[in-house]
């Protein structure tokens, strides 16, 4: 039986690739059964949930408030997704700029190859597993997501940013 579980993943990096944030992973359930006996706070990712596993304004705002930037100024480039609207909120040292509508696929660095390569790494990790031993659940997916994001290199990130001309 095919799983109906879905996850949304937010990836973020600076332009030179020297600082990649841990993935933000959004699932449907606050405490999936697979999290039993696992301290997910020890994993290099952030987990949030809502009924559809979508990015919501509240999740995005919480993520922004928890953003670790070491006191450095941050320019965050975002598409115009409604969940990215953060009106009337101040984030110290973080400036948000929205990309023009309908240009994301052309000038968004994550869409210029970073996400595609992340997915390729994920598929390679998944393909290396024995199908009989594979019990895919949220925790297993997270255990694939983390090394897949780690495999995206500084060089790839720089090249994708350069490709967009930003």
Image (cartoon, helix red, strand yellow):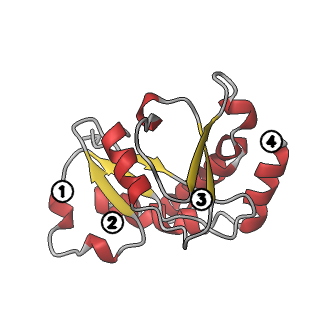
Q: Secondary structure at mark 2?
A: helix
- Of label 4 and label 1, which has the lower sequence position? 1
CA distance for labels 1 and 2: 20 Å
- Of label 4 and label 2, which has the lower sequence position? 2
- Is residue 1 left or right of 6 when viewed as pictured? left
Quadrant (top left, top right, bottom left, bottom right) of the N terminus:
top left
Q: Between 77 and 87, which is closer to the camera in this rendering? A: 87
Pointer 3: what residue? Answer: 121
Q: Residue at x 29, y 48 (%)?
A: 27
- Give the mark toward the camera: 4 or 1: 4
Q: Residue at x 73, y 58 (%)?
A: 15
- Is residue 54 left or right of 164 when viewed as pictured? left
Q: Residue at x 16, y 58 (%)?
A: 31
Crowd class of label 4 (few under 14; some 14 to 19; many from 20; radius 10 Å): some
Pointer 2: what residue? Answer: 133
Pointer 1: what residue? Answer: 32
Pointer 4: what residue? Answer: 164
- Give the mark toward the camera: 2 or 3: 3
Crowd class of label 1 (few under 14; some 14 to 19; many from 20; radius 10 Å): few
- Of label 1 and label 2, which has the lower sequence position? 1
- Give the mark toward the camera: 1 or 3: 1
- Of label 4 and label 3, which has the lower sequence position? 3
Q: Is residue 100 visible?
A: yes
Crowd class of label 2 (few under 14; some 14 to 19; many from 20; radius 10 Å): few
Query: Where residue 141 appears, x then y in whole percent?
Result: 38, 58
CA distance for labels 4 and 2: 41 Å
CB of mark 4 within 8 Å of CB of mark 3? Answer: no
Q: Is residue 135 visible?
A: no
Q: Secondary structure at mark 4?
A: helix
CB of mark 1 within 8 Å of CB of mark 3? Answer: no
């Amino acid at each position: 039986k095919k799983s109906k579980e879905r996850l949304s993943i937010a990836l973020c990096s600076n332009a030179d690739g020297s600082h990649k944030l841990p993935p933000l992973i959004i699932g449907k359930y606050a405490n999936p059964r697979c999290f039993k006996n696992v301290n997910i706070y020890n994993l290099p990712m952030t987990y949030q949930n809502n009924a559809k596993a979508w990015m919501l304004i509240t999740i995005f705002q919480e993520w922004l408030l928890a953003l670790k930037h070491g006191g450095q100024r941050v320019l965050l480039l975002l598409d115009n997704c409604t969940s990215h609207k953060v009106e009337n909120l101040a984030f110290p040292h973080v400036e948000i700029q929205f990309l023009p509508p309908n240009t994301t696929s052309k000038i968004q660095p994550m869409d210029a190859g970073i996400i595609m390569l992340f997915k390729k790494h994920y598929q390679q990790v998944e393909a290396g597993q024995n199908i009989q031993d594979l019990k895919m659940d949220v925790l297993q997916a997270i255990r694939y997501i983390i090394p897949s994001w780690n495999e995206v290199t500084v060089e790839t990130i720089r090249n994708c940013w350069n490709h967009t001309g930003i």
